[in-house]
Image: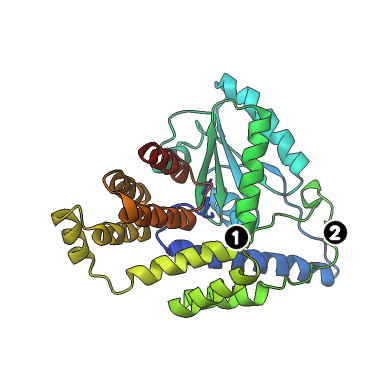
């Protein structure tokens, strides 16, 4: 799963850093607006948990809504018998999860432009096909009839990534039932919220050394903090490629495949440019033809790039398998 970029933090065109920050800001604005309306005596707007979407409503119901809650798209058609098995399960789970995600149903026959766009981008071959949108970023989930237990696992991972990487926590409980949701008291700020915000701001401003130090400070006190782990991995990547002459680096790597530093630099450039499989393949191949300290250095760098993309991303899982095969 990609918004760890989703990841589900997705492909890192290193707008991933900026996209996550913007998504968090939009999510916070949506929460603030709900709170403002409730404080003024107004009811929280009712949001249907299952909605039929067409080309006219897609932008509002899916793309804009995805800054506030993960939107799961069910691509279906009337003639599709597997769709008739899967759709009721998804609809029931949308109600059960009570605002943690919204289900958007897209009839592919009536909305061919939407389906074609996703097919081309994600390589979808048929239906039923289930895709999520988190902070405007598409995340392929699964295709075909899938066991409910597996669907629940995928949804749980999606919700976790949306919250941890993008700050998207879903709708208030009950908001989809047509009655005002009671959000209760605000959760107290966590002990690392301030330092994390400062680190993210430094990263946004391009103050990479400061961002690295700030994230390292958080991790010194909270080694398992996933937001700090992701931020540190991204800041270190940006710092490594800062000032590189991409053309010269690529030429050096092509001229001398044994130049390990050149291979590492090209992999960094590829990842930062969104060419994730190329970056992973280059380093897996380099691991395969090296030994000793050189092999370990390449392996460590590859693990660092996995952190930038996010462990739930299917490209990471594939590259981990390839790495295991060359190591063992």
Determine the residue located farthest toward the front in the rendered image: 292
* Helix, strand or loop at mark 1: helix
- The percent coordinates of residue 34 (x first, y second) are 75, 65
Tag on residue 134? none
The quarter of the picture where residue 60 lies is bottom right
Q: Is residue 2 left or right of residue 177?
A: left
Vertical comparison of 112 with 210: above or below: above
Tell me if I can see residue 122 in this picture. Answer: yes
Vertical comparison of 75 with 33: above or below: above
Q: Is residue 43 left or right of residue 111?
A: right
Q: Which residue is mark 1?
A: 226
Considering the image in quadrants, where does the C terminus appear? top left
Vertical comparison of 120 with 194: above or below: above
* Helix, strand or loop at mark 2: loop
Q: Nearer the viewer, residue 276 or 22?
A: 276
Vertical comparison of 167 with 40: above or below: above
Q: Are marks 2 and 1 in contact (CB under 8 Å)?
A: no
Q: Which residue is mark 2?
A: 182
Residue at 47% of width from left, 42% of height from top? 317
Tell me if I can see residue 166 in this picture. Answer: no
Q: CA distance from mark 2 to mark 1?
A: 29 Å
- The percent coordinates of residue 254 (x first, y second) are 17, 54
Q: Nearer the viewer, residue 174 or 112?
A: 174
Of badges 2 and 1, the one in the foreground is 1
Mark 1 nearby-residue class (10 Å; few <14, some 14–19, many ≥20): some
Mark 2 nearby-residue class (10 Å; few <14, some 14–19, many ≥20): few
- The percent coordinates of residue 257 (x first, y second) are 19, 52
Residue at 65% of width from left, 51% of height from top? 160
């Amino acid at each position: 799963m990609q918004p760890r970029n989703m990841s589900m933090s997705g492909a890192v065109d290193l707008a991933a850093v900026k996209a996550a920050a913007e998504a968090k800001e939009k999510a916070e604005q949506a929460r603030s607006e709900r709170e403002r309306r409730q404080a003024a005596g107004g009811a929280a707007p009712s949001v249907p948990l299952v909605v039929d979407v067409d080309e006219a409503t897609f932008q509002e119901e899916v793309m804009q809504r995805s800054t506030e809650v993960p939107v799961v798209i069910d691509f279906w058609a009337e003639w599709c018998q597997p769709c008739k098995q899967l759709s009721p399960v998804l609809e029931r789970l949308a109600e059960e999860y009570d605002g943690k995600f919204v289900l958007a149903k897209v009839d592919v026959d009536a909305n061919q432009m939407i389906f074609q766009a996703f097919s081309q981008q994600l390589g979808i071959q048929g239906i039923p096909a289930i895709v999520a949108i988190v902070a405007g970023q598409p995340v392929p989930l699964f295709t075909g009839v899938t066991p409910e237990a597996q669907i629940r696992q995928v949804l749980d991972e999606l919700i976790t990534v949306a919250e941890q990487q993008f700050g998207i926590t879903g709708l208030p409980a009950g908001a989809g039932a047509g009655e005002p949701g009671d959000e209760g008291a605000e959760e107290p700020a966590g002990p690392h919220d301030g330092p994390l915000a400062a680190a993210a701001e430094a990263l946004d401003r391009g103050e990479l050394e400061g961002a690295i130090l700030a994230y390292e400070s958080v991790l010194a006190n909270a080694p398992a903090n996933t937001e700090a782990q992701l931020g540190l991995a991204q800041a270190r990547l940006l710092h490594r490629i800062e000032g590189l002459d991409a053309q010269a680096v690529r030429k050096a790597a092509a001229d001398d495949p044994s130049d390990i530093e050149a291979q590492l630099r090209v992999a960094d450039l590829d990842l930062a440019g969104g060419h994730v499989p190329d970056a992973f393949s280059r380093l897996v191949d380099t691991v395969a033809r090296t030994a000793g300290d050189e092999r370990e250095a390449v392996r460590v760098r590859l693990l660092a790039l996995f952190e930038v993309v996010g462990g739930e991303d299917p490209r990471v899982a594939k590259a981990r398998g390839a790495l295991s095969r060359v190591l063992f």
